């Protein structure tokens, strides 16, 4: 596979469930990102990892928990989410701070 | 605070030219990106400007004026497939990418 992949593409979960989103990049980049995209709002940066180290956490609620086991893989663990967390979750990667390559996203619905 | 402003929506005719503006107020500047995002898909890179002036790439061109905090994306010979959202993003002094809300471009035959 090439580029940035994300699984699952669609996820419906209840507020008491625990689930994880997965992202993998095949580009040899050293930085990976999680974004939340809600309708008609700017992309919201959630987490940034450089060389597996978390460098940004933009006041994201603790019900979102990132994990970066190596520079190619990124996870977002979800638990006790709220309906307002329903959105498109995008993963991206870049070499240093330049052009970001995005995955196709996971459409999350919290019921 | 940091802010990126773009029109919410624009409409243009197939074959015509459209200019999408972006103004920004950020703490420092290390470059500006334009991305295209089709409905239900991931954003894809269009252009990067760090110096003042016009960058041309086929039917798409991007302009930057750092003194005015202003950029535009120019799309020529519009095609129906150009219907998408166009996102402006600025790298600030901390190398954080600040995103605009995007401009939805509707192309009519």
Image: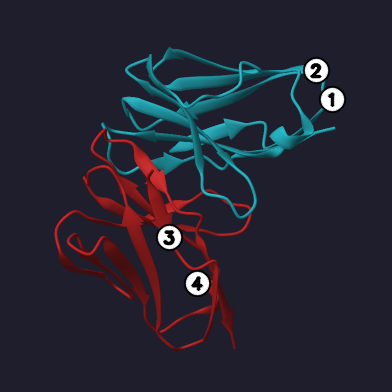
Chain colours: A cyan, B red
Quarter of the figure with residue A97: top left
Circles 2 and 1 in contact, beta carbons < 8 Å: yes
Q: Position of residue A55 (x, y in %)?
A: 36, 20
Task: Report in which chain the residue with disc 1 lies.
Answer: A
Left or right of A74 on screen, residue B26: left
Residue A75 drawn at (x, y percent): 55, 20
| Quadrant hosting residue A56 | top left
Q: Secondary structure at mark 4?
A: helix
Q: For the residues tagged 2 and 1, is the chain the same?
A: yes
Residue tagged 1: A14
B25 versus B14 height, above or below: above
Q: Which mark is residue B5?
A: 3
Inter-mark Cα distance, 3 to 1: 36 Å
Q: Chain of mark 2?
A: A
Q: Secondary structure at mark 3?
A: strand
Same chain? Circles 3 and 1: no
Q: Which subunit holds the residue at mark 3?
A: B
Q: CA distance from mark 1 to mark 4?
A: 37 Å
Task: Mark 1: give few (<14), some (14-19) or many (20+) Cα within 10 Å.
Answer: some
Judge the density around disc 2: few (<14), some (14-19), many (≥20) Cα neighbours within 10 Å.
Answer: few
Disc marking residue B82: 4
The answer to whether dots 3 and 4 both sit on one chain is yes
């Amino acid at each position: 596979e090439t580029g940035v992949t994300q699984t699952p593409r669609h996820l419906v979960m209840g507020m008491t469930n625990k689930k994880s989103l997965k992202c993998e990049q095949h580009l040899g980049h050293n930085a990976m990102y999680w974004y939340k995209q809600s309708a008609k709002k700017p992309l919201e940066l959630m987490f940034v990892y450089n060389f597996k180290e978390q460098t940004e956490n933009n006041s994201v609620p603790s019900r979102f928990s990132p994990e970066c086991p190596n520079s190619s893989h990124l996870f977002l663990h979800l638990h006790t989410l709220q309906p307002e967390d329903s959105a498109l979750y995008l993963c991206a990667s870049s070499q240093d701070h330049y052009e970001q390559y995005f995955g196709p996203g996971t459409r999350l619905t919290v019921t | 605070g940091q802010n990126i402003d773009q029109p919410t929506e624009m409409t243009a005719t197939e074959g015509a030219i459209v200019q999408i503006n972006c103004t920004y107020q950020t703490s420092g500047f290390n470059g500006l990106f334009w991305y295209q995002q089709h409905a239900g898909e991931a954003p894809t890179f269009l252009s990067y400007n760090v110096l003042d002036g016009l960058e041309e790439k086929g039917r798409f061109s991007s302009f930057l004026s750092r003194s005015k905090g202003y950029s535009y994306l120019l799309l020529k010979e519009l095609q129906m497939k150009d219907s998408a959202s166009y996102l402006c993003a600025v790298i600030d002094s901390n190398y954080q990418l600040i995103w605009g809300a995007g401009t939805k471009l509707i192309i009519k035959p």
